[in-house]
Amino acid sequence: MQPVAIQNSLNAASRPGRLQRIALINPTKFLGNLLLNGQYIQHLAKWCHAQDSQLLVVLDSRFEQLFGPAFSVEGIKLCYYPRQALKQGRIPWLGVRQWWQCVSEIRRFAADLAFTIEEDSVAHRLTHLSGAKVRVSCSEARYHFGFDAILHIKRQGRCADTPSIWHVTGDIFSSLGLPVPEHISYPQLNLGSGQYQIGGDASRPMVVMHAGASKRYKQWPIENFVELAKSIVSEGYRLSLIGAGPDDAQINAGILKAVGPANCQDYCNQLSLIDLASVIRQAHFMIGNDSGPSHLGSALGIPGVVLFGPTDLGLWKPLGAQTSVLHHKELCQSDCTRHHCRKGYACLKEVSAEEVMAKLKTHTDQL
């Protein structure tokens, strides 16, 4: 459906010229995705407040502590999808009850417009169930059934001027007649004044390292991280390892064994998202794969390096001005994809520890 036709449908569902009740259904489980789109949520919340319109934003419950204060504006409702409760099979009825409460809250809101901004199955199912007068999907390839409009928004292979997922979301908002921020940015996070107490020698500048990755094509070789960690410690820095889950824990254990505990602390599986942000905020420099924590460091303005592989760099590149990206896309074939690479992801694996260390030293020299 074209923007004019969509707008006609929206006008028919609400007072002419203004939507009164908007539901943004965005329960993504990916921290990086929410950070890349978070400025739009903040901007829309402020716009709705100024327009005396009502806004409901649906987020994953895991992000309540970190993003709740950032997105809270008078008159704006936040609803949390209980993804983690649904995964905990020990008390299955508890997750189902929380799911029903989430769906009921969305339906009680009685939106004029409910829409998605990601190609996410949970978001689309909740939009189906929203009871909104107009339900809009942003996925051209999937989830067509049960929607009043499908937005044909290009994601891959965008023009050089508007490559980012930030611009994709801007196209979605523009198609719906919703406001687009003037400048590309992460959301402003309200973390408060609390500070997580970090161990180690406080006289040494701290480097935060996230050596894990959610996908194998995003994983810089573990031996490279070990080599890099040894160089970091030998140059007089203290190292803080972060991560979550058994895979990250195993990776961090190998790094800690290689460099020793004197100047390296492992915080894997010990930090809430607020604590994670506090640790990162105290860093002199941050190094990591293409991941949510790397985007969080970029959003907090921490200088750092993010290691990229076959992921679309234009689409997912961190937005922070102090974040550098290292990759060697020139080493891969033109037909390489995230799931098939004849060069074994050389674009990522051939980035050397020396290159990353050079970025760290360059930053240190500029201080």
Image: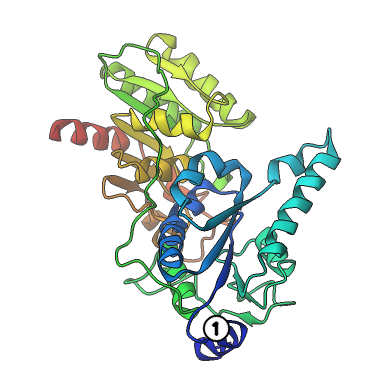
Determine the secondary structure under disc 1: loop
Query: In this picture, is 269 found above or below 215?
Result: above
Query: In this picture, is 260 found above or below 80?
Result: above
Q: How is the image coloured?
A: rainbow
Residue annotated with mark 1: 15
Q: Which residue is depicted at the point 40% across and 18% down?
A: 198
Q: Is residue 213 visible?
A: no
- Percent of width and height locating residue 299: 36, 46
Query: In this picture, is 296 found above or below 239?
Result: below
Residue 269 quadrant: top right
- Number of marks in the rendered image: 1
- Percent of width and height locating residue 222: 50, 31
Q: Is residue 230 left or right of residue 139?
A: left
User: 110 or 318, which is in the foreground?
Assistant: 110
Q: Is residue 65 visible?
A: yes
Question: Which quarter of the figure is the C terminus placed in?
Answer: top left
- Percent of width and height locating residue 280: 38, 32
Question: Which quarter of the figure is the N terminus placed in?
Answer: bottom right
- Percent of width and height locating residue 209: 41, 30
Residue 259 quadrant: top left
Going by the numbered disc 1, the residue's amino acid type is Arg
Can you name the residue that lies furthest to the left here?
366
Residue 161 quadrant: bottom left
Q: Residues within 10 Å of mark 1 (few under 14, many from 20)?
A: few
Can you name the residue that lies furthest to the top here?
262
Query: In this picture, is 349 found above or below 13?
Result: above
